[in-house]
Amino acid sequence: MLDCSSRPGEVKCDSNAKDIEPASDCGSDFAFPYFISFYVLCSFLIINLFVAVIMDNFDYLTRDWSILGPHHLDEFVRLWSEYDPDAKGRIKHLDVVTLLRKISPPLGFGKLCPHRVACKRLVSMNMPLNSDGTVLFNATLFAVVRTSLRIKTEGNIDDANAELRAVIKKIWKRTSPKLLDQVVPPPGVDDEVTVGKFYATFLIQDYFRRFKKRKEQEQKEGDKESQNTVTLQQYEMTPFSNCFPGGFLRNHSLFGSVWSSMRRGHSGFHRARSLKVNTTQAKVRSLVCIPAINYLNDIWSAAL
């Protein structure tokens, strides 16, 4: 700073400099404010700005993304524009479930959230439903944030809405009554249709259908078990002689073969050992008679 300042007789100009007389004095009094301001800016502004950038990046890398923050609101706006390309500020109430399932928690439900669980969470939201079946952007965003942060969601909903309206009027005094009625419906409007009431009706119908289907299935299984019981009783009452075609055990092919071998004597037993029954020619009824089969097994063992 002193080298650049004006000091007559001490600071001489370079003899090789152009447009300057040799052996003349150089320097300027502007050096004092210039170097002072430069030092102040570099010491207190540039260095602090550099440190702030480092701290901001460190905070970004170590941030807990599960905590609701402004970055979730940007995601909500981006996905809302897919269902509202004309930017009218409203979408169909049926698209609300799909929209919130696309948004990651904690603001949304996530892709892995079942449809029935998403409908249960929408029941707790008190978003007004318009006559054309649409919901507003402000009402939806406020209801989602309110449910995620659990702001005045416990107890009676009318009392909670009244308390929340009073808090909003106290903090944001310039909030228009129309916008306030959109995000927090006034208490005492029982006949107003909301998204929560719509999805509550949907869940009731779905539970009734599932209950009715389960009862019909149980009734079919009960009828099937009773039919099996009747069949078993008929089987127990079946005579021994009705187990084979013709009504007589002697007429059965397997019994006839064994009986003929036994009548031929000891020499025929060896042929009886190698006796092969053609199962395609034997016609056995669908109702198997256990006593007859046991009887044939005893005869066959005796023959061997």
Image: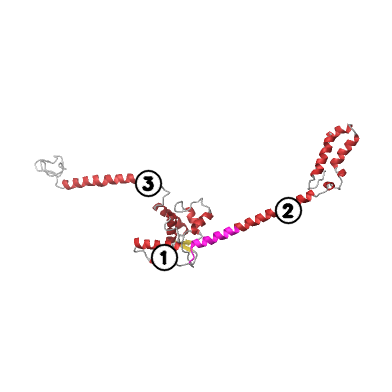
Indicate which disc residue 181 carries: 1
The segment highlighted magenta reads 192-209
Furthest residue to the right?
264
Task: Identify the residue position indicated by label 3 in the image.
Answer: 60
Q: Residues within 10 Å of mark 2 (few under 14, many from 20)?
A: few
Residue 1 is left or right of residue 252, and the answer is left
Q: Can you give x and y, in whole percent of width and height, for residue 131 in the image?
A: 49, 67
Indicate which disc residue 227 carries: 2
Q: Are marks 2 and 1 in contact (CB under 8 Å)?
A: no
Indicate which disc residue 214 carries: none
Indicate which disc, 2 or 3, sits on the residue closer to the N terminus. 3
Q: Nearer the viewer, residue 220 or 260?
A: 220
Q: Can you give x and y, in whole percent of width and height, for residue 54 in the image?
A: 33, 44
- Is residue 280 something one can see in this rendering? no
Q: Residues within 10 Å of mark 1 (few under 14, many from 20)?
A: some
Which callout, 1 or 3, points to the residue nearer the camera?
1
Q: Are marks 1 and 3 in contact (CB under 8 Å)?
A: no
Circle 1: residue type? Asp
In the rendered structure, does residue 194 fall within the stretch colored magenta? yes
Q: Using the image, determine if residue 138 lies above or below residue 68.
A: below
Which callout, 2 or 3, points to the residue nearer the camera?
2
Circle 3: residue type? Tyr
